[in-house]
Amino acid sequence: MDTPARLTIRRPDDWHVHLRDGAVLAGVAPHTARQFARAIVMPNLSPPVTTVAAARGYRERIVAAAPGFTPLMTAYLTDATDAGELVRGQAEGVFAAAKLYPANATTGSAHGVNDIARLMPVLAAMEKIGLPLLIHGEVTDSAVDIFDREAVFIERHLAGIVRELPGLKVVFEHITTAQAVDFVESAGANVAATITPQHLHLNRNALFEGGIRPHAYCLPVAKREVHRLALRRAATSGSAKYFLGTDSAPHAVSAKEAACGCAGIFNAAYALESYAAVFEEEDALGRLEAFASQNGPAFYGLPRNEGTVTLVREDHVVPDIIEAGGTPIVPFHAGETLRWKIA
Ligand code: NCD
Ligand code: ZN
């Protein structure tokens, strides 16, 4: 198929993003808002966003940083979460979803859930009111190989949650394995997944190319090539179960390039262009709009955005560093040439 020189799609949304707070928020939010009308905003601030009041305040700070942009707020689930707070937050139009981090699974998850079994009453309340559960699907058992933690999470936890609460809307976030794709495929329409650009571009070799590469490190960590290929097939399949979620997770260069560098890839600045490259390589540009602009709102029960965004075929080099409110951050694809550019 000939590649068109321009591609116009309905304005997309990002169904999983970390915007941080303070000066960094002011620096990164405009990058997301340039491309996306709305985004599901992760609550792993310090302290985490666990209450309606905290989410409301955070929402105001985001809108101040990116006027016109619509942040969709999430509640951070803990061992102490009160279902009543979630019900009230949804009723008041604040919470669009709740996020489950297994305790200590990733950056900013220290206050996460230690015992998922004890959270079941809260999840049952979410099922009842139709509040989606967003899951960081990795076990934290140090005896489990880090590359197996997502697949083991499915067996130990996710399969049971979905079986016991068949009406619960579940987004299996930032999936990285063929096992996750198989699980989502075999589940009902209430189970969907987000897929990041980095997991479509990188396999685990990228972490060790000529030396250790901290800017390719995020959690869940990239897996073998066979998994990347499964994710590419899923994202570009046209299935309504997969939608765009960047997991853009900015960290200062100094926090990444360290003896214990932290997990997270900042991809917000060129996210749509990055996905477009994948869809073009898979000869599926015609399916980018469903993935980016249709499947997410359909799952969340929200209207599609009005307006469009146009990508033009134009080579551009991604900068080595992006300053976000005084913090230097290395963006995904730094120094590489991207073929699509937002007009
Ligand atoms: C995220 C972060 O830095 O907040 N990091 C990451 O590697 N994705 C946390 C998360 O989503 O796991
Ligand atoms: Zn994330």
Image (tube, rainbow, N blue to C red):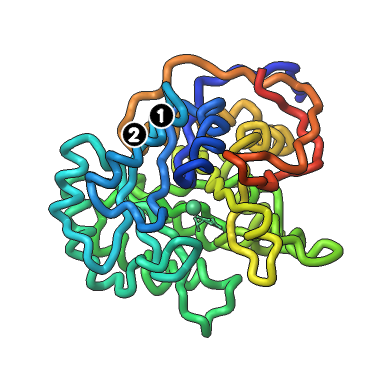
Q: Residues within 10 Å of mark 1 (few under 14, many from 20)?
A: some
Placement of 277 over or under 79, stated as above or below: above
Secondary-structure class at tag 1: helix
- Residue 237 falls in image quadrant: top right
Tell me where residue 240 appears, x and y as whole percent.
45, 38
Q: Identify which residue, 50 or 273, lies in the foreground.
A: 50
Report if the CB atoms under discs 1 and 2 are less than 8 Å apart. yes
Q: Identify which residue, 19 or 103, lies in the foreground.
A: 19
Placement of 281 over or under 227, stated as above or below: above
Question: In the rendered structure, which amino acid carries the disc numbered 2?
Answer: Glu
- The extreme bottom residue here reads 143
Question: In the rendered structure, which amino acid carries the disc numbered 1?
Answer: Ala
Which residue is tagged 2? 60
Which residue is tagged 1? 64
Tell me where residue 192 appears, x and y as whole percent.
42, 47
- Residue 288 falls in image quadrant: top right
What residue is at 51 percent from the left and 66 percent from the top? 150
